Image (cartoon, rainbow, N blue to C red):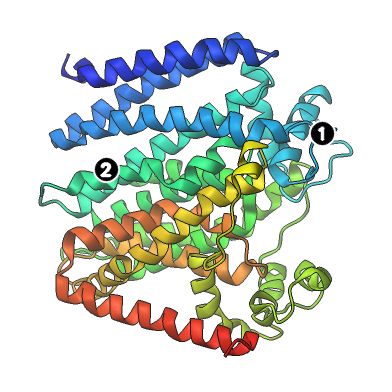
């Protein structure tokens, strides 16, 4: 019964959410509104149960905050949905129609209407349409349903991150519960609202890499068959929705097999099986997009595009770039340039769109999705900027202490491999791509804040802010301001 012992505050918040959210959905949604209300009630209660279960299993009473954060997340999700996303879902009235999540919302229903045949729909990786199409088929076609499902998937991923974080940092301290704030990462809140790919992929990548990491570091008793099932299903989802992410996933597995080794005897046979699994995933799974009616994906072609801007969409849109654009300047034209430009591109992905800050209340009131997106992107950039010294400190410490405790490396291998792939594989700087690695970054920041010495954090802060200062000077000189 202890799993059902909810704090009174959570019960009050739950009834407030359902009492206000349910009638509002019924009065504003014309299609499948009743099923959306039932889904709201279901995910709210099941989410609370999962939060309570996590708190009890991890034996940290302070983690009761998970339930509060979950209900707050649902409330914010509904607010963002109505304020910034639903106004953009009418092709006739939206001035910015054509954004990927807008098209997915319509095309997923078209997929159902066409008896699950892609037909004339043109899309690189059609798995996302099958994902949202399945949701619409079960619950009905309205924007509330995918937002609630996405929020629930993010909850499960965050609870898993909390579980893994507590395993890595086995010694309990008073503020370890702060890892739970990963539920309210601004960009995750925003992209959960939309029929987008980013938060779904963030969850799948987290499940795959951290489950592999737990196995290699032996922080949990995971059998090899169970591991292969979890990793295999997640890899299938990644292949169907965004196949290029198979490459950093496979690289992460290989790096963990090489570096994440406990002091006790190694698992040579098991590790070899997992490395073979990684290479097999790269060889076989890229065929899935084509089987689902999308375009063929090839690892070699992806690497060629990443190392040369020639024939890339980034250059075809160059005329729309600002004069002396930094993003255009950092598009590589050779493998050597791809390597040299990678560090500054990684920094840009972390801090962009800073220092540009421009949001108007009129645009927010009008339901302009770009303004609402900026409202969520800017605080995420601030979090990245302020939190990076903690992540870097944790990275340094994890490398120094890996022979004594290799477990922290699983977080860093997962995150830095993913950031490298995002910054190197997407030649146009688009902040939304970094969302796929945001939960992993939050875990690295938390680990640094909870385990690293003040001196190490100060050293990495001096390095990070010094790097930003030098980059700012170079930017001003390049723009002709100085």
Horizontal and vertical percent for residue 470?
A: 45, 86
**For the point 37% across and 27% down, which residue is it?**
71
**Residue 283: where, in percent of width, then height?**
62, 59
Along the horizontal axis of the image, is 281 left or right of 362? left
Judge whether 210 appears above or below 13 on screen. below
> To which residue does mark 1 refer?
93
| Residue 375 image position (x, y, % from top left) | 53, 49
Callout 2: helix, strand or loop?
helix
- How many numbered marks have been drawn onto this rendered protein structure? 2
**Residue closest to the eye, 345 or 378:** 378
Residue hosting label 2: 163
Estimate how packed mark 1 is, as few (under 14), some (14 to 19) or many (20 or more) residues with alpha carbons within 10 Å.
few
Q: 482 or 337, which lies in front?
A: 482
Which label's residue is closer to the chain start, 1 or 2?
1
Q: Residue at (49%, 63%) from the top-left corner?
A: 418
Residue 269 can be seen in this image: no
Is residue 193 shown above or below 414?
Answer: above
Between residue 134 and residue 218, name the one nearer to us.
Answer: 134
Residue 274: which numbered mark, if any?
A: none
Residue under the image location 28 percent in, 66 percent down? 390
Q: Quadrant of residue 469?
A: bottom left
Residue at figure coordinates x 32%, y 44% from the top left: 181
């Amino acid at each position: 019964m202890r799993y059902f012992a909810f704090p009174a505050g959570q019960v009050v918040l739950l009834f407030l959410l359902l009492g206000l959210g349910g009638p509002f959905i019924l009065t504003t949604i014309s299609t499948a509104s009743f099923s959306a209300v039932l889904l709201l009630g279901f995910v709210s209660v099941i989410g609370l149960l999962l939060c309570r279960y996590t708190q009890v299993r991890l034996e940290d009473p302070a983690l009761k905050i998970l339930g509060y954060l979950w209900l707050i997340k649902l409330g914010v999700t509904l607010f963002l949905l109505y304020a910034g996303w639903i106004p953009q879902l009418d092709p006739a009235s939206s001035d910015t129609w054509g954004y990927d999540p807008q098209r997915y919302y319509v095309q997923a229903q078209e997929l159902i209407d066409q008896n699950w045949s892609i037909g004339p729909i043109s899309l690189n990786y059609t798995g996302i349409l099958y994902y949202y199409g399945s949701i619409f088929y079960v619950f009905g076609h309205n924007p509330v349903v995918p937002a609630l499902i996405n929020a629930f998937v993010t909850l499960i991923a965050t609870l898993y991150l909390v579980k893994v974080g507590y395993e890595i940092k086995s010694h309990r301290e008073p503020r370890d519960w702060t890892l739970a704030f990963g539920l309210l990462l601004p960009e995750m809140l925003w992209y959960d609202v939309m029929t987008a790919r980013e938060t779904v992929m963030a969850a799948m990548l987290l499940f795959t890499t951290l489950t592999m990491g737990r196995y290699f570091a032996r922080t949990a008793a995971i059998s090899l068959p169970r591991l292969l099932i979890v990793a295999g299903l997640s890899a299938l989802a990644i292949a169907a929705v965004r196949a290029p992410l198979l490459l950093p996933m496979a690289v992460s597995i290989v790096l963990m097999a090489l570096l994440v080794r406990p002091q006790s005897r190694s698992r040579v046979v098991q590790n070899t099986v997992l490395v073979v699994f990684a290479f097999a995933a790269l060889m076989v799974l890229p065929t899935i997009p084509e089987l689902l009616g999308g375009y063929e994906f090839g690892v070699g072609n992806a690497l060629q595009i990443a190392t040369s801007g020639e024939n890339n969409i980034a250059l075809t849109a160059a005329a729309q770039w600002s004069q002396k654009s930094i993003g255009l300047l950092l598009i590589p034209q050779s493998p050597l340039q791809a390597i040299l430009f990678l560090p500054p591109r990684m920094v840009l992905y972390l801090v962009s769109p800073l220092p540009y800050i421009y949001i108007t209340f009129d645009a927010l009131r009008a339901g302009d999705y770009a303004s609402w997106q900026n409202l969520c992107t800017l605080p995420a950039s601030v979090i990245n900027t302020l939190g990076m010294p903690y992540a870097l400190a944790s990275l340094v410490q994890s490398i120094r202490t890996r022979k004594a405790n290799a477990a922290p490396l699983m977080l860093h291998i997962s995150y830095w491999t993913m950031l490298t792939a995002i910054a190197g594989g997407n030649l146009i700087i688009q902040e939304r791509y970094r969302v796929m690695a945001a939960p992993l970054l939050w875990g690295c920041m938390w680990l640094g804040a909870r385990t690293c010495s003040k001196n190490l954090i100060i050293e990495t802060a001096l390095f990070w802010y010094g790097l930003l200062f030098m980059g700012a000077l170079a930017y001003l000189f390049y723009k002709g301001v100085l």
